[in-house]
Amino acid sequence: MRHGGGTSVWLRRVLTVAVPAIVLAVVGAATGLPLLRDRSQQRLEQRAEREVTATAQLARARLLAEPMAGESTLRQAADAVDGVEVLAVRSDGPRAEATVRLVFRVRVAKTAASVFGWQRADSAACFALAVPADAGPVALERLSCPD
């Protein structure tokens, strides 16, 4: 013969297992989701930084395609690249033997959809490039940007 309280014993057993499992799941989600969001944002920022460098290299290639061009032509070539803003152009003499120094800023804004909604990363860097009149190897110099 069964004595009363069978349901309450079953309920107690279920609650002693379910409540800790639910609490563990909530605590895990509360600590894990921000870490995943931060990692996702970090990857997006790294992609934006790589794109800044790639855009600067593209601007460098376009500038070196016409080494005998004048200051205004070089400025237009750099401005034609998306995300590039020319800050300064300076020549050190007549163009036939002169070197033109360009300082430009590259800005990139990346957005991405994620489990956490839309994420955005902005990246900017300044570069200097000395374009010699003769075709030779030229290094792209990274500078700190003026505000």
Image (cartoon, grey):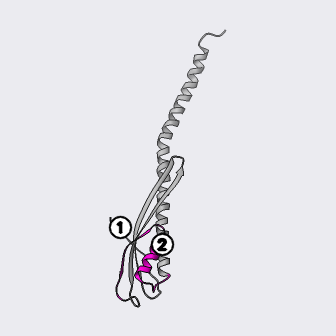
Mark 2: amino acid: Ala
What's the residue at 56%, 29% (across, down)?
A: 18
Image position of 1 with respect to 80: above or below: above
Q: CA distance from mark 1 to mark 2?
A: 20 Å
Q: Secondary structure at mark 2?
A: loop
Q: Residue 22 at x, y = what percent? A: 53, 32
Quadrant of the image for the N terminus?
A: top right
Q: Residue 74 at x, y = what percent? A: 44, 79
Q: Extreme bottom residue here? A: 96
Label for residue 145? 1
Image position of 142 with respect to 133: above or below: above
First along the sequence among labels 1 and 2: 2
What's the residue at 56%, 21% (across, down)?
A: 12
In the visual, does 77 lie left or right of 92? Answer: right
Mark 1: amino acid: Cys
Q: Residue 98 at x, y = what percent? A: 38, 87
Observer-nearest of 90 and 47: 90
User: From which residue to which does the magenta span run?
Assistant: 65-93
Quadrant of the image for the C terminus?
A: bottom left
In which quadrant of the rendered view does residue 11 lie?
top right
Observer-nearest of 71 and 59: 71
For the residue carrying disc 1, how many other residues have a C-alpha within 10 Å: few (<14), some (14-19), or many (20+)?
Answer: some
Image position of 135 with respect to 105: above or below: below
The residue to which callout 2 is attached is 80
